[in-house]
Amino acid sequence: MEVIIVKDYDAVSQKAFEVMKEVVTGKKEPVLGLATGSSPIGLYKNMIKDHKENGTSYADVRTFNLDEYVGIPRDHEQSYWTFMHENLFSGIDVKEENVHVPYGDTKADCEAYEKAMEDVSVDIQVLGIGANGHIGFNEPGTPFDEETHIVTLTEKTRQDNARFFEGDINKVPTHAITMGIATIMKAKKILMVATGENKADAIKAMVEGEISTDCPASVLQNHKDVVVIVDEAAASKLSK
């Protein structure tokens, strides 16, 4: 696990972009695992800027997203499908048929998403981290051998996300479909981005803590190629 500490969010986004571009330009048909949330937005902005200014092409790229809410339509303004199109896909030349975001609420939907990834190998998986160490919607206690599955969102997660739903927790979906930890671990390379003091405990537990389902991200210690890019605030509790 390589931990890179930089000054602030912009520096995190720039460094993450450098790691991403190496994968995008270094392989014939790269497969990108993507994440939503505020952490990777800067990375995506840099990808769009580079595409427009330098012509870096995504025409042969396939993408697979980590997760999606259950029970809201694809075109809902808060769906992760919409988020990805607004923050990345509409600004690059990726083909719509090469974009994959999980969708549905049944075991069969989960199995179909796993099957879609069966014949590909994700070259780089972008991750953020929750304050409690969650990755994707894999909350503490999620078994490490879990593949794509439906999760019941915790009250805390729904409260955190209410700000996107007019501050009304009743409008926040109660379930999500997410890649499991075993699915995430299949990626050849993991790119974790985190900023802010509120992530410092989670980063410390992930990097220096014992590997435990209490901090789902700690499983990344077992992965052969992980790059963690954090700002000084998120790194503030690391002792090494």
Image (cartoon, rainbow, N blue to C red):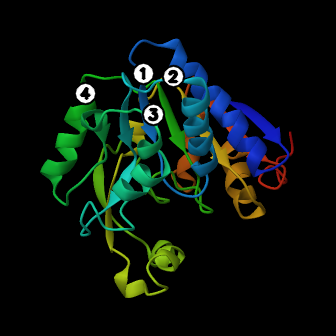
How packed is label 4: few (under 14 Cα within 10 Å), some, or many (20 or more)?
few
Q: Write down the residue under mark 1.
A: 30
Q: Amino acid at mark 1?
A: Pro
Mark 4 to mark 3 CA distance (whole Å): 14 Å
Q: Is residue 212 visible?
A: no
Callout 2: SS: helix
Return the disc, 4 or 3, that comes first in the chain's sequence. Answer: 4
* Label of residue 164 in the image: none
Mark 2 to mark 1 CA distance (whole Å): 6 Å
How packed is label 2: few (under 14 Cα within 10 Å), some, or many (20 or more)?
many
Callout 3: SS: helix
Q: Write down the residue under mark 4.
A: 118
How packed is label 3: few (under 14 Cα within 10 Å), some, or many (20 or more)?
many
Residue at image point 58% right, 29% down: 20
* Label of residue 185 in the image: 3
Please provide percent x and percent y for residue 59.
37, 25
Outermost left residue: 108
In the picture, the quarter occupied by the N terminus is top right
Q: Amino acid at mark 2?
A: Val
Closer mark to the observer between disc 1 and disc 4: 1
